[in-house]
Image (cartoon, rainbow, N blue to C red):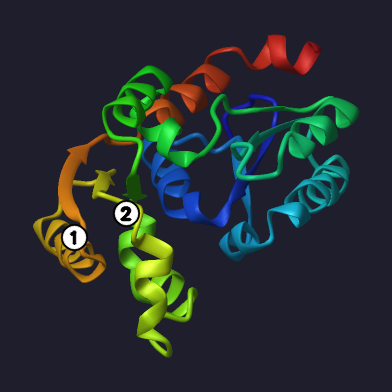
Amino acid sequence: MSGKTPLLLIACGALAHEVTALLRASRWQHMQVQCLPAKLHNTPQLIPEAVRAQIREGRTRFERIFVLYGDCGTGGQLDAVLVEEGVERIAGAHCYEFFTGGAAFAQMADDEPCSFYLTDFLVRHFERLVIKGLGIDRHPELLPLYFGNYKRLVYLAQLEDPKRVAAARAAATRLGLEFEYRFTGYGELASTLRALDDAPALAAAD
């Protein structure tokens, strides 16, 4: 062990691969990640209390806790829970913003508000989460109802992988959208974890 204060990261399951990769590459052995199911995004009203439960359970084993969730459609309720529990989270409304950075995402949204975004996680699980999750596989007539107002699909890639780019391009074609590719890497997810690692004593003292 590093001798640093043990830190629990409570993360959305959609970030599990990326957070684990960062912890392994940086050898942050004092950090452990506990992921909640990504499917909670289908019922965002359940996210705040699910995070609260993880915080309270985590306090029995960890001196520090940090949350890797955006607002994720909770309408400010997640932040209200975190204030009550005295725990901070990564800045941003959603994982797209984590990966691109807040200013860059705001510019993209201004350039084309009618954009649908995919991350590596969503490309890997596109069929299950989007096509089957929205019932388009059973009812193709739903596709224009869900995506008729979108104009482009933007793939925000964490890893450079030609096969994944091809899969994202195929997803755009399937949805009838223009395709745009942007490599983001781990973005502010990585810088946030580095900042947590750089100031363990201060965070522990708080």
State the residue position of label 1: 164
* Kind of residue at badge 1: Arg
Determine contact: label 2, label 1, CB under 8 Å: yes
Image location of residue 42, percent across then percent down: 61, 63
The quarter holding residue 102 reads: top left
Could you tell me the amino acid type at mark 2?
Asp
Residue visible at 59% across and 65% down in the picture: 39
What residue would you read off at disc 2? 120
Taking the spot 70% from the left edge, 44% from the top edge, the residue there is 74
Circle 2: element type: helix
Rendered residue at 76%/53% (across/down): 45
Q: Secondary structure at mark 1?
A: helix
Q: Residue placed at 78% from the left, 46% from the top?
A: 48
Q: Where in the figure is residue 190, as x and y percent of width and height?
A: 41, 29
Tell me: 102 left or right of 87. Answer: left
Above or below: residue 147 compared with residue 118: below
Dot 2 or dot 1: first in sequence order is 2
Label 2: how many residues lie within 10 Å, few (<14), some (14-19) or many (20+)? Answer: many
